[in-house]
Image: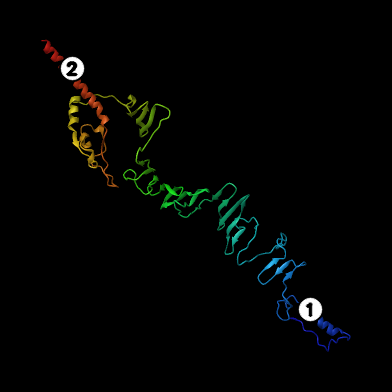
Amino acid sequence: MSGYTRQSAAQIVTGAVATATPVAAEFNQLQTAFSSSTGHTHNGTGGEGAPITVMGPAQDLIVSDVLVRPKVDDTMDLGSPTYQFKEGYFNQKVCASKFIADAGSLSVPSFSFGIDDNLGMYRQDTDSVGFQTDGTLRMRINTTEVRVETGMQVVLPDGTAAAPSIATFASGRNTGFYSAGTEDIGISLGGSAFAKLDGGDNTIRLGDLTTSSFGTSGTVGVSIADIGSIQIARAGTVITTNKTDGDGTSVTFNRNGTTVGTISVAAGVTAYNTSSDYRLKTVIAAPNGYDPTERITDLADCLTWFEWKDYPEVGPQFGALAHVLSAVAPYAVSGVKDDVDVETENIIPQGVDWSKLIPDLIAGLNAANQKIADLTARIEVLENA
């Protein structure tokens, strides 16, 4: 036994009277062997005794070279509310059916990391868990919300239309939001791209999400820009309106907040209306030299035969060139001659509203009727002479 040397046979003889000196020496040797610092170790080596593998009054704790466990499952505590261990160190995982920690605080979270102990999680409030970094609350979860604090961002992977980063329904994980490009947000339905919020040109697109303009491309879709423009392209009817409360205006056109035209419907008919209210007009005299008959001649001089360059299959057409007509009736022509979009270099064509020429036709026809009446009267006088 380590730390113990028995007295010699000459000092302690079997059957002889034991004297105080050898007995005291034997006791001192035993005391040394069981000393708390230098005594018996029970490590299984020679003179140290067999290893101790069970402990406790009922041998409740089992100890081996790889395991410390209770003799019976779920019967022994490690520490108590009154007598607690100071710190515990584990090299690998700790498994438990339930972890209960102190509430902690923003500065001293209940769960943190040894190399960064001001990063962690704590009880922020009743039924509320707080997450902090560098001693600052970043996010909280309670019974009604998941709140990301001011100044923080939630950054998700880009995702795809088939596997969006944010799935809106547990039963439909392929419906939601994903990154559709730099500064673009995609919306998918059933794993297919449905719409895109384009941060490059501030538009919302539905349909073909790759096109830049439904107004000029052959692709199908809808584009709504933040500047108030809408482009729609599809095969078949593009826009359908259905006024469900009977006759009246279906579409209104405003200019700077003032109505300048409408499209209205009635039983079996559609009317295209340009504002003509007397409250919007000031009546003036006809321009000097205005002759309705000559006006018809001037308008006729603007007419010509032509073919559309992009649609020659339509065949010869009879009409006017906008810039020529604008010299006679500028109010019937829109746009500027030779205008071009500086960004796309596409032409911005002029247009003609032929309805604006109807008053000229009415005035010319009326003047012609008057001349016909005058001539008819003179012929009748001659015939009766």
Q: Residue at x 84, y 83 (%)?
A: 23
Q: Nearer the viewer, residue 87 or 231?
A: 231
Label 1 sits on residue: 31
Q: Which mark is residue 373?
A: 2
Q: Is residue 122 left or right of residue 161?
A: right
Q: Is residue 307 left or right of residue 176?
A: left
Image coordinates for residue 335, horizontal then vertical, percent: 26, 38
Q: Nearer the viewer, residue 361 or 280?
A: 361
- Dot 1 falls on a residue whose secondary structure is helix
Image coordinates for residue 313, horizontal then vertical, percent: 23, 40
When the figure is inspected, residue 120 is found, relative to residue 355, above or below; the finding is: below
Image coordinates for residue 98, horizontal then vertical, percent: 65, 57
- Quadrant holding the N terminus: bottom right
| Image marks 1 and 2: residues in contact by CB distance under 8 Å | no
Q: CA distance from mark 1 to mark 2?
A: 153 Å
Q: Which mark is residue 378?
A: none
- Dot 2 falls on a residue whose secondary structure is helix
Judge whether residue 286 can be spotted in this image: no
Q: Nearer the viewer, residue 174 or 291?
A: 174
Q: Residue at x 55, y 49 (%)?
A: 147
